[in-house]
């Protein structure tokens, strides 16, 4: 909802399990989870925050709402968190970089080179995030935004 902090995201996975996830942002600021969804979609990051959720990770900010959780879901979630630590940290760093660029903040050349994202893809992600920011700002208070995140095709990860 555009008028509250923190934002709550309702997550429905392909297996029918639904979680509510509390996140930062809201009000005039883009919610952090929405920033990740846009950037991970635009840059085809399959193993970032949302790819992990799709594959069964349950972050500490998530609360089970409905649907039957698969057997050994907690163990799978913990294993995926361990296995994907570096990938999620990279997704966080890239999301932070794109968000800062979209807001016009100064970024060091070394930050651009260590992101490992081609300049044209980075520019497209910045524009996608700016467009999302404009759409977010135009929402009326109490409005719900629905977004479907789909993992990129295998072999097309960045």
Image (cartoon, rainbow, N blue to C red):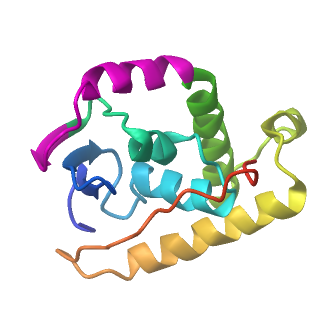
Question: Which residue is drawn at the image coordinates 78% and 43% (left, top)?
Answer: 107
Residue 155 in the image, given as x and y percentages of width and height: 75, 50
Whether residue 43 sits left or right of residue 129 in the image: it is right
Choose between 17 and 4: the one closer to the eye.
17
Question: Which residue is drawn at the image coordinates 56% and 41% (left, top)?
Answer: 48
Whether residue 128 sits left or right of residue 4 in the image: it is right
Residue 119 in the image, given as x and y percentages of width and height: 88, 57
**Could you say which quadrant of the image residue 60 lies in?**
top left
Residue 73 in the image, given as x and y percentages of width and height: 27, 29
Whether residue 129 sits left or right of residue 3 in the image: it is right
* Quadrant of the image containing the N terminus: bottom left
Question: Which residue is drawn at the image coordinates 20% and 47% (left, top)?
Answer: 19
Residue 88 in the image, given as x and y percentages of width and height: 56, 32
User: Was residue 73 drawn as part of the magenta stretch in this picture?
Assistant: yes
The correct choice, above or below, for 27 with respect to 144 in the image is above
The correct choice, above or below, for 87 with respect to 103 in the image is above
User: Was residue 29 drawn as part of the magenta stretch in this picture?
Assistant: no
Question: Which residue is drawn at the image coordinates 39% and 55% (left, top)?
Answer: 31
- How many labels, in total? 0
The correct choice, above or below, for 111 with respect to 1 in the image is above
Q: Which residues are magenta?
A: 63-83
Furthest-front residue in view? Answer: 71
Choose between 66 and 61: the one closer to the eye.
66
């Amino acid at each position: 909802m555009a008028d509250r902090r923190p934002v709550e995201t309702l997550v429905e996975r392909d297996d029918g399990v639904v979680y509510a996830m509390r996140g930062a942002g809201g009000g005039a600021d883009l919610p952090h989870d929405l920033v990740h969804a846009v950037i991970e979609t635009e840059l085809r990051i399959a193993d970032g925050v949302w790819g992990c959720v799709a594959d069964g990770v349950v972050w500490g900010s998530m609360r089970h709402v409905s649907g039957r959780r698969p057997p050994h879901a907690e163990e799978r979630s913990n294993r995926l968190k361990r296995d994907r630590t570096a990938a999620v940290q990279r997704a966080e760093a890239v999301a932070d970089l794109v968000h800062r660029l979209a807001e016009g903040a100064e970024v060091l050349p070394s930050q651009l080179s260590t992101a490992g994202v081609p300049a044209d893809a980075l520019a497209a992600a910045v524009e996608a995030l700016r467009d999302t920011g404009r759409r977010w700002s135009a929402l009326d208070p109490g409005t719900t935004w629905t977004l479907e995140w789909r993992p990129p095709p295998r072999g097309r990860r960045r």
